[in-house]
Amino acid sequence: MKAEERVLVVLCTFPDRDQARQIGTALVERQLVACVNLVPEIESIYRWEGKICREGEVLGVMKTVAGRFEALREAIEELHPYEMPEVLALPVEAGSEGYLKWVRGEV
């Protein structure tokens, strides 16, 4: 398999469900991701500009391929309301071959 066909799971948090749905739908429409799972009602605790913050957020779990990651990252940064959105890519080491083939075919 070529490096650009390697499947990735990309994580991104959103401020609320509506924005997560809107951005997730745009990413699927642009064929940058095959799928976005939205995990509602997570709590994030982090330091921002010297202060400890606690925020309710929605976690987006996206499936894509390495060859589409840079375009995906750019689209998230374009569409996302946060000054610095979380965009973390994790390589998929193994999985259902049928599902991985589907992901590759959708992006």
Image (cartoon, helix red, strand yellow):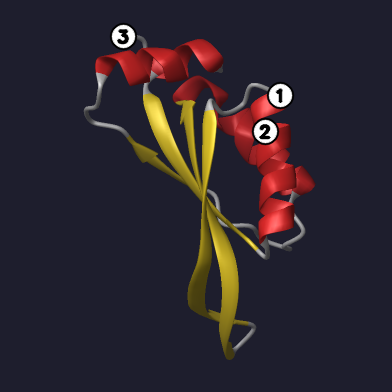
Work out how far the residue at label 2 is from the one at label 1, CA to CA, in angstroms: 5 Å
Residue 35 position in % (x across, y down): 53, 31
Residue found at x 64% / y 83%? 49
Whether pointer 2 and pointer 1 mark residues with C-beta atoms closer than 8 Å, the reply is yes
Circle nearer the N terminus (3, 2): 3
Q: Nearer the viewer, residue 77 or 9?
A: 9
- The local crowd at label 2, few if under 14, some if 14 to 19, many if 20 or more residues have their Cα within 10 Å, is many
Q: Is residue 37 above or below residue 94?
A: below
Q: Secondary structure at mark 2?
A: helix
Q: Amino acid at mark 1?
A: Arg
Which residue position holds label 3? Answer: 1
Circle nearer the N terminus (1, 3): 3
Which residue position holds label 2? Answer: 27
Locate the C terminus and report the quarter of the image it occupies: top right
Residue found at x 65% / y 41%? 24
Residue 44 position in % (x across, y down): 50, 74
